Image (cartoon, coloured by chain):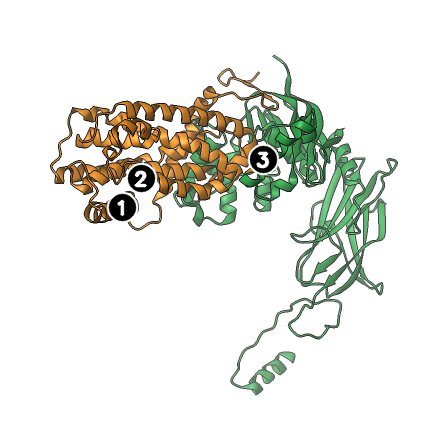
Amino acid sequence: MRSSNTFSPTVVIKPSPGFTLKFKEFWNYRELLYFLIWRDIKVRYKQTMIGAAWAVIQPFFTMVVFSVIFGKFAKIPSEGLPYPIFAYCALVPWTYFANSLTKATNTMVANQNMITKVYFPRLVLPVSAVISGIPDFLISFLVLIGMMFFYKIIPTVNILFLPLFTLLAILTALAVGLWTSAANAIYRDVQYAVPFLVQFWLFASPVVYPSSLIPAHWRFLYGLNPMAGVIEGFRWVLLDKGEPPGLMLVVSLFMIILVFVGGIIYFRRMEGKIADVI
Amino acid sequence: MTDIAIQVEGLSKYYRIGKRGVQLTLKDSLAKSWRRAFNLFKFQNNRQDEFRDTNNSIWALSDVSFEVKKGEIIGIIGRNGAGKTTLLKILSRITEPTKGYAEINGRVGSLLEVGTGFHPELTGRENIYLNGAILGMKRAEIDHKFDNIVAFSEIEKFLDTPVKRYSSGMYVRLAFAVAAHLEPEVLMVDEVLAVGDTAFQRKCVGKMGDVAKEGRTVLFVSHNMSSISALCSRGIWIDNGKIVQEGPPDHVIQAYLSDGISGKSTIRFTTNAAKTGQISFISIEAEGEKPSTVLPFGKPIFIKIGYLIRERLVDHRVGVVIRNMAGVTIFVSNNSDFFTKSMSITPGTYVTRLKIPGSLLNAGIYVVSCYLGEPKVRRLDTRDNAIHFEITGNPYRSNEVRQGLLAYPFEWHLEKTDSWSQNIRGSQVKRK
């Protein structure tokens, strides 16, 4: 045996029996996760002229367009709030979710060279894709704070729940991303379907309208869309409008956990195959 | 603890090649699920059915078993597509076997490629960390080896330049430098030494030799027989997913090289154990191409000669004679023209290569003869008119067929002078 400081694990290789979650192994690769996140963040706005301003432009101009079309022309109610901040407050978590999901979906294919040449828990890839979107989220969040000053909106003590809803947004992106990234490695159809899905999903979530438009007795079913719970949560926490999280959030939470656990199982089952078929 | 580093038993890998090249779509998969559901009623055992040998499926690896002791350096050889890389991919856990079992004792590092995960936008320094992490090094470990990696790569000056601005040579050197500092107990290497210029390649082979001396276990796939022969303690020859032969590297290499691959571009000779030295094959190829007897004009031509030596010799000569179809000798060349020191040689298998510059020989058919000998002592082996090749294509811009044996682009000079008569007079003066 060589030196004592390197422990010598025994690696057993055989066709995978059912599945194992291998969380411990994932933990052992946390440095790789760190480096991949670091790479994504570092590289994102290289060779651009306005750099990280792109993180703001997307949600901000979407907000402007929505304010004109849905706020001004269609006169969609906004719970008594100025429509721009009503929409932007939802667009901050939504943009994060939409971008992270798209990125997670493509991450396996984008890194296929790594997948076919080196072993590491493939789970690292979608996780890093989702986490590396957080700086963009924070930058667009700064603009939200600016808008709150502008409209003189002071958040209540509810703001303590903000990290919880942020975490839920991350988990939702990861939960769905686990499914789409593994599926996209095998069926490229997914990468064309996801932008579509995201587009529909936007209108299925209370971004341009408040969820109070939905009849009260159906609203808990609306929570089956996890982003509904997240977005309503953001409005409640920051703007003190909309309902305090109730049954709808519980349903959303339940959905997130279901999709997340299912996603991990599905991902792990596909993991062994991915290097061969990608 | 056990002294076995790698234990492989009945490892097999099945691929559906038809569907590997063509992109799988959701439709295919749904159709397959439907067929499978339908098959449930028809066959009791459709699991067996899944692995049948058909036209669009292969066993890339079938029932491979071997054992590697700690500290052994194993060279794996075989033709392209024989299953060598599949074996390494399974052992480094990139892909799962279909059947079989393997056990590896110790920290595994695999190098199927150098520079995996390099990002063109990141600097050399940043890529060292990124690539190191991808290869499985800890951050502290990279910190510790950082200076050595930089020194090995010889790119100190460009450490903070994005690698997309690197020349391909610098890129490869940096990539290999990181890889070379991976220090697992079991290392698997796939043909990554064939990078960079000759000087760097020599450095890489040297590094591999060091790794071997440190007592690490190495599994090494290569087409470079001389490095296999120099580095490895045992050779394994794989063909069609099966182990054909394993044993002392020189024996395995010899068996592999003399395996009857048809095609006149490579001629193999049966070996005779009674001879001290012997030519085992001659092959011809244009630079960067597969062996072929028809070569395009303009590309350098390589004549490869494989030979065996069974005794230690103080000096030896390998020579080539090129004649045209008329039997005129165009040139004779031997290794002492190039290697000026005396070439002492130990028993083993060698491959030497003669490079004929492109744009030297005119279009036409040429015959190659080879000989092997000990200078001033004896001739060991002679292969007269062993192989021939044809150079095709018109060397010049005009359509006419150029006369002559050579078609070398000789140098011409042109200058405008004021007085023509002066020049003439000048030359006349010199003549006196």
- Name the residue that disc number 3 marks: A276
Q: Can you tell which chain is drawn orange?
A: A
In this rendering, would A25 be left or right of B348?
A: left
Quadrant of residue B421 within the rendered picture: bottom right
Q: Residues within 10 Å of mark 2 (few under 14, many from 20)?
A: many
- Chain identifier, green in the render: B
| Residue named by callout 1 | A62
| Badge nearest the viewer, 3 or 1 | 1
Quadrant of the image containing the C terminus of chain A:
top right
Under mark 1, the amino acid is: Thr
The three-letter code of the residue at mark 2 reads Thr
- The residue at which mark 2 appears reads as A95
**Left or right for B318, reference A85:** right
Residue A170 image position (x, y, % from top left): 34, 30
Labels 3 and 2: the sequence-earlier one = 2
- Left or right of residue A31, residue B411 in this image: right
Most foreground residue, B284 or B413 = B284
Residue found at x 40% / y 43%: A196
